Image (spheres, rainbow, N blue to C red):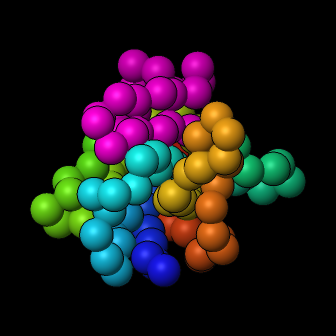
Amino acid sequence: QVQLVESGGGLVQAGGSLRLSCAASGSISSINAMGWYRQAPGKQRELVARITSSGRTNYADSVKGRFTISRDNAKNTMYLQMNSLKPEDTAVYYCKRMGGLLGDLPIGSWGQGTQVTVSS
């Protein structure tokens, strides 16, 4: 099975930017949908953004206009460009293969994720 590893998190000031990367151990070209989730302290994980194999994207209302999800099949990597960051974006971010009837459920085990901290 394809393994996914997140990287690129860090500490930034409000209004700053970060780009997260999700490196896969194998080809992602056949994966119909992938996405980024996040989990803040004391809260459950939530889906932030999703991208399909054809490049169609969806975003949570809270990040629309600020975050951009993309994938590079040649590099077997998915990205999340985060601009105009807000303190409420602070969370551990995870990348996942997605599936299920509606293509909105995470598939596979959860890794360590990458920490994003935004100061006010």
**60 falls in the magenta region:** yes
Q: Nearer the viewer, residue 98 or 7?
A: 98
Which quadrant: the C terminus? top right
| Residue at horizontal 20 percent and vertical 54 percent from the top | 72
Q: Nearer the viewer, residue 71 or 120?
A: 71
20 up-or-down from 119: above or below = below
Q: Residue furthest right?
A: 42
Image check: 58 left or right of 61?
Answer: left
| Residue 108 seen by the camera | yes
Residue 64 x/y as whole percent = 47, 21
Residue 22 x/y as whole percent = 37, 64
Q: Nearer the viewer, residue 46 or 12?
A: 46
Residue 102 x/y as whole percent = 64, 35
Residue 54 x/y as whole percent = 29, 36
| Residue at horizontal 33 percent and vertical 44 percent from the top | 53
Q: Residue furthest left?
A: 74
**97 falls in the magenta region:** no
69 up-or-down from 56: above or below = below
| Residue at horizontal 62 percent and vertical 61 percent from the top | 107
| Residue 37 seen by the camera | no
| Residue at horizontal 59 percent and vertical 76 percent from the top | 112
The answer to which quarter of the image holds residue 87 is top right
The answer to which quarter of the image holds residue 20 is bottom left
Q: Which residues are magenta?
A: 47-69
Image check: 87 left or right of 57?
Answer: right
